[in-house]
Each structure stands twice: as C-alpha cells, then as structure tokens.
Image (tube, rainbow, N blue to C red):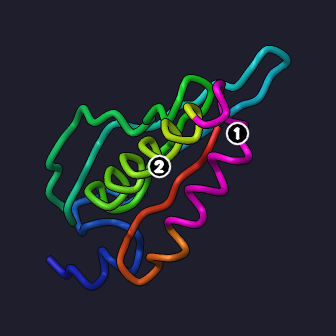
Amino acid sequence: MDLAMGAQDGADGMGVPHTGTTIIAIAFDKGIVIGCDTRVSIGNYISNRASDKVTPLCDNVFLARSGSAPDTQLVSDHVRHMVHQHAIEIDGLPEVKTVANLCMQLVYNNKGANGGDGLFS
C-alpha cells in the first residue's frame, strides 16, 4: 500500500477520503439552522464519533468549531466567560457582532498558539 498516493488523491489508500469537518449554517426568516458532523479524528484514528461541535456562547450566539478540539474548546470556554461578564455589564444579551469580535480578538492575539476555526451564528 502506497500511503503517499493516498495522501495525494485525498484518501488514505483504502478508499476513505480525508474530508475534515463539515459545517453548514443556513439563514431563514426566523433564524439560523446550524449543522456539523460529529467525528473527531487524530490522523486516521477516530477518537470520538459523537462530539458536539456546536457550542453555545450565550443564549443568542453559537459557535460551530473545527480544527484542534482542545484549542477550539479552550477558545469557546474563554469567550463564553467574557460574554457572560459582558452580559452582566450591559444587563442583557450581547449582540452577535460583539461576541464574534471577542472570538476574533482572542484567536488573532493567540494566532501562533491555536489550531482551530469557527463559524459564528
């Protein structure tokens, strides 16, 4: 089995494609529907088949995570904490734009240290 060929044609040599995380968000008149796959893998090894990649950051904002699971979980935990503090300060729900900016700042300021991406809805 030639593993180099598998990597080149997008498969592992056994016909299984390497597709990464699948995330989709669809907006409609009453909100947004978010969907993700549930598989977490390390190379060819599937470490978890039932991971929840959609993480609530507050009541009106959710994060769809892709990339390194520990990194994206850490980002979502930190942002959830910052959003909770902000919600107390403003005595209400933060705007989606504000939460997205908090995430962007956290990821950008630690860009060499993390391996994750997110889709905010």
Indicate whether 105 appears above or below 48: below
Residue occupying image coordinates x 45% and y 48%: 65
Indicate whether 55 appears above or below 76: above
Q: Image check: 3 left or right of 71?
A: left
Q: Amino acid at mark 1?
A: Val
* Residue range of the region highlighted in magenta in the rendering: 89-106
Q: In the rendered image, which residue does mark 2 sit on?
A: 79
Residue 21 visible, this angle: no
Q: In the rendered image, which residue does mark 1 sit on?
A: 96
The residue lying toward the viewer, choosing from 9 and 68, is 68
Secondary structure of residue under mark 2: helix
Where on the picture, by quarter, is residue 41? bottom left
Q: Amino acid at mark 2?
A: Val
Residue occupying image coordinates x 26% and y 48%: 40
Residue 119 visible, this angle: yes
Indicate whether 27 appears above or below 107: above
